[in-house]
């Protein structure tokens, strides 16, 4: 099975900072990659699918890129409401594995 | 609007069984694959199982294969997860989630139901 890794596992950044989270697949998954945001105590929320397509209603400061095995989620200007854990997920085929998550908080 | 509502969670002893339900509304249910995803306390998301809209195909995560069974009743707009031989490490919040047509990412999630496995 394809394994998903994320880095870093956690980060602290200041309001307005550009934040980058990396996700890596152990095999080529083309662009079958989604990103989710989960705020503390809340249900996960879809941010991006097809590696770079923003889900409707998601702020434009969120962006995704990559293909094959290496992917990036970028928050262009970190806001207080972005404090959350972010997960990548492969969906080219079952199993639909999630990455271990990256916890983002405010410095 | 799209809604997914899980039920059936609770406290169960190791080795026993439990059946979760996911009731859906607000979309063409029989056309859409439904997935179960779980999250152990303080841990990350783990994909558990999915079932195609017509029920013709089902897939399972390695950790539940052979113990859990996913099914659906399209006349009731409901998906079920039958969990047998429960283990302590099956304890988690179980979410059902909808995958848009032909896709494997999840655009709508339920609120989750908590399963506790303890003697």
Image (spheres, rainbow, N blue to C red):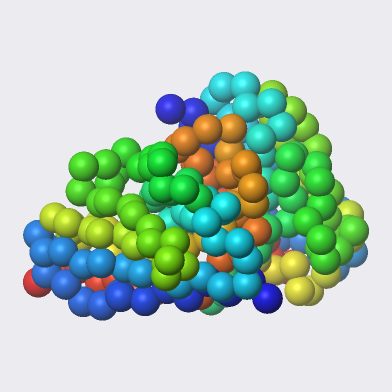
Where residue B112 appears, x then y in whole percent? 45, 72
Where residue B97 appears, x then y in whole percent? 53, 60
Where residue A92 appears, x then y in whole percent? 59, 32
The vertical placement of A26 against B69, above or below, is above
**Nearer to the camera, A107 or B47:** B47
Relative side of B41 to A71, left or right: left
Going 43% across and 27% down the picture, which residue do you hit? A1
Going 45% across and 37% down the picture, which residue do you hit? A95
Q: Quadrant of the C terminus of chain A?
A: bottom right
Q: Is residue B77 visible?
A: yes
The vertical placement of B101 against B78, above or below, is above
**Nearer to the camera, A76 or B50:** B50
Going 49% across and 28% down the picture, which residue do you hit? A2
Relative side of B14 to A90, left or right: left
The vertical placement of B6 against A5, above or below, is below
Relative side of B8 to A56, left or right: left
Question: Where on the picture, by quarter, is residue A76?
Answer: bottom right
Q: Which residue lies most toward the front here?
A: B75
Relative side of B53 to B71, left or right: right
Where residue A14 appears, x then y in whole percent? 82, 65
Q: Is residue B92 visible?
A: no
Question: Where on the picture, by quarter, is residue B108?
Answer: bottom right
**Nearer to the camera, A37 or B77:** B77
Going 38% across and 58% down the picture, which residue do you hit? B72
Total numbered circles: 0
């Amino acid at each position: 099975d394809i394994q998903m890794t994320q880095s870093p596992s956690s980060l602290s950044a200041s309001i307005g900072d550009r934040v980058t989270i990396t996700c890596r697949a152990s095999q080529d998954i083309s662009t079958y990659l989604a990103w989710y945001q989960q705020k503390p105590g809340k249900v996960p929320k879809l941010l991006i699918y097809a590696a770079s397509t923003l889900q409707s209603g998601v702020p434009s400061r969120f962006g995704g890129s990559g293909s094959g095995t290496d992917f990036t989620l970028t928050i262009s200007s970190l806001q207080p409401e972005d404090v959350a854990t972010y997960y990548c997920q492969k969906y080219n085929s079952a199993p639909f594995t999630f990455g271990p998550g990256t916890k983002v908080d405010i410095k | 609007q799209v809604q997914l509502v899980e039920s059936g969670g609770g406290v169960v002893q190791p080795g026993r069984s439990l059946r979760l339900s996911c009731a859906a509304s607000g979309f063409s249910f029989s056309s859409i694959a439904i997935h179960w995803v779980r999250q152990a306390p303080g841990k990350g998301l783990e994909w558990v199982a999915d079932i195609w809209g017509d029920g013709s195909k089902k897939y399972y995560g390695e950790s539940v294969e052979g113990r859990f069974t996913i099914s659906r009743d399209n006349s009731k707009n409901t998906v079920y997860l039958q969990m047998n031989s429960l283990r302590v490490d099956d304890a988690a919040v179980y979410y059902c989630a909808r995958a848009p047509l032909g896709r494997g990412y999840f655009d709508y999630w339920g609120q989750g139901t908590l399963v506790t496995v303890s003697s």
